[in-house]
Image (cartoon, helix red, strand yellow):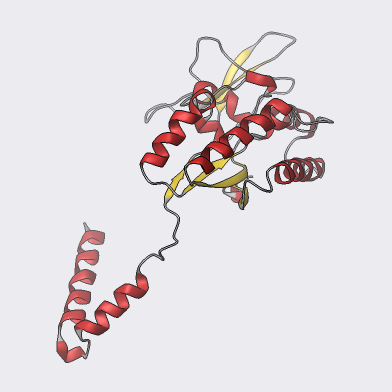
Amino acid sequence: VVMLLATSLCFIITFVMFNDSQYGVEKEELDKAVRKMAFRKDFMWGGATAANQYEGGYQEDGRGLTVADFSMGGSHTKPRMVVWQNPVTGEQGETSAFDPKLPEGAAPAIRTDAYYPSHRATDFYHHYKEDIALMGEMGFKCFRMSISWTRIFPNGDDAVPNEAGLAFYENVFDELHKYGIEPLVTLSHFDIPISMVQRFGGWDNRVWIDCFEKFAHIVIQRYHDKVKYWLTFNEINNM
């Protein structure tokens, strides 16, 4: 309520200032100020997604698993959880997906009777042509998306990239350009390879830097003539 009143008061003051001639603000000056605040004609309106929230096809064409693939669905009353299992004893349990703490000797596991949003997501992997056609119909000029690291390097540090994964994104970029949509590509959006997490821990291990550099080099080199705009990390503070 306080914020609403403060906002209303601010609007009233602004309205009075810009409409009362005693402040020396004429209509022409106001129009000029509004035009300066307007979006440029070449501003790229569009939409945004992330591979782990949108693609689906989480095990198709050689894609490896990411940390996001172990996060079960949640609700406003139940937080998202990760299942863990001890491969020796068979013991299972759950831990928070946002601050996972696994007992010693345990590893993340996937339950066959649970819902995992990233596994199918909105199935962009199989329906990207229809989805992009809808973007074109809506007049998109830009589409922010991410590349799933494990679709290119299933374990994160493989010797050679997965050609099927590279071909998928190539097809996506070609389809976007068909509708005059510029791709804006994020290299890492909450879906780092689980294989590397289990072997090397987190980003404080220098191995990650070298592997990410290799991944970035491969995709930027492959798509240099199809993608103009690149982002490194989504919300780098969450790494």
Front residue of 59/160: it is: 160
The image quadrant where one finds the C terminus is top right
Residue 87 in the image: state x and y as whole percent: 72, 12
Which residue occupies 75% across, 27% down? 155
Left/right placement of residue 204 relative to residue 96 reads right
Closer-to-camera residue (224/201) = 224
Q: Position of residue 9 (x, y in %)?
A: 20, 70
Residue 228 visible within the image? yes
**From the viewer's perspective, is residue 40 above or below residue 79?**
below
Tell me which residue sits at (24%, 65%) in the image. 7
Question: Picture coordinates of residue 57 (x, y %)?
Answer: 57, 22
**In which quadrant will I find the N terminus?**
bottom left
Residue 193 visible to the viewer: no
Depth order, front residue of 91/221 = 221
Q: Measuring 38% from the left and 65% from the top, which residue is drawn there?
A: 39
Q: Is residue 232 above or below residue 68?
A: below
User: Is residue 26 found left or right of 174 in the rendered image?
Assistant: left
Q: Residue furthest right?
A: 159
Place of residue 185 in the rendered image (x, y in percent of width and height, measured from the top left): 59, 45
